[in-house]
Image (spheres, rainbow, N blue to C red):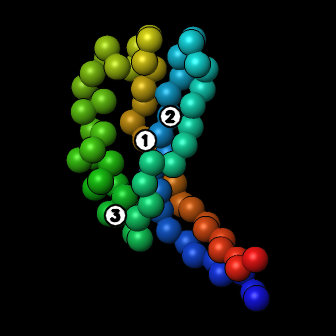
């Protein structure tokens, strides 16, 4: 069976600190870029105003909106 490919948008969580280094992973999948951007602001917009979360020991950054290519295949 032929693999199915779907394009969508996601939020890539990013944090970098001395204890665990660089961490990046996808936290959500959305059908459109505008929905992903709106969700990022609603869920993670507060990080911009919190220098205590951006510095050690957390090292958080506001998630980036990224395009995803999801491939599914029946084995």
What's the residue at 51%, 48% (across, down)?
A: 26
Q: Nearer the viewer, residue 63 or 73?
A: 73
What's the residue at 27%, 44% (across, down)?
A: 43
What residue is disc 1 on?
63
Tell me, for residue 45, which label it has, or none.
none
Disc on the earlier residue, 3 or 2: 2
Above or below 40: residue 57: above
How far apart marks 1 and 2 lie (CA) works out to: 6 Å
The kind of secondary structure element at disc 3 is: helix
Residue 25 sits in quarter: top right
- The reply, left or right, for residue 7 in relation to residue 51 is right
Above or below 2: residue 9: above
Where's residue 55, x and y in %?
Answer: 41, 14
What residue is disc 2 on?
14
Q: Nearer the viewer, residue 25 or 47?
A: 25
Above or below 40: residue 20: above
- The reply, left or right, for residue 29 in relation to residue 45 is right
**Residue at the far bottom in the pictured view:** 1
How far apart marks 3 and 2 lie (CA) works out to: 20 Å
Disc on the earlier residue, 1 or 2: 2
Where's residue 8, x and y in %?
Answer: 50, 68
How far apart marks 1 and 3 lie (CA) works out to: 14 Å
What residue is disc 3 on?
34
- The reply, left or right, for residue 24 in relation to residue 35 is right
Residue 37 sits in quarter: bottom left
Disc on the earlier residue, 1 or 3: 3
Q: Nearer the viewer, residue 13 or 73?
A: 73
Query: Do the residues under discs 1 and 2 have CB atoms within 8 angstroms?
Result: yes
The kind of secondary structure element at disc 1 is: strand
The kind of secondary structure element at disc 2 is: strand
């Amino acid at each position: 069976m032929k693999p199915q490919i779907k394009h969508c948008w996601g939020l890539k969580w990013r944090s970098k600190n001395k204890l665990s280094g660089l961490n990046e992973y996808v936290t959500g999948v959305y059908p459109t870029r505008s929905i992903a951007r709106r969700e990022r602001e609603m869920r993670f917009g507060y990080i911009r105003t919190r220098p205590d979360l951006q510095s050690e020991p957390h090292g958080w950054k506001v998630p980036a909106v990224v395009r995803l290519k999801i491939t599914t295949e029946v084995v």
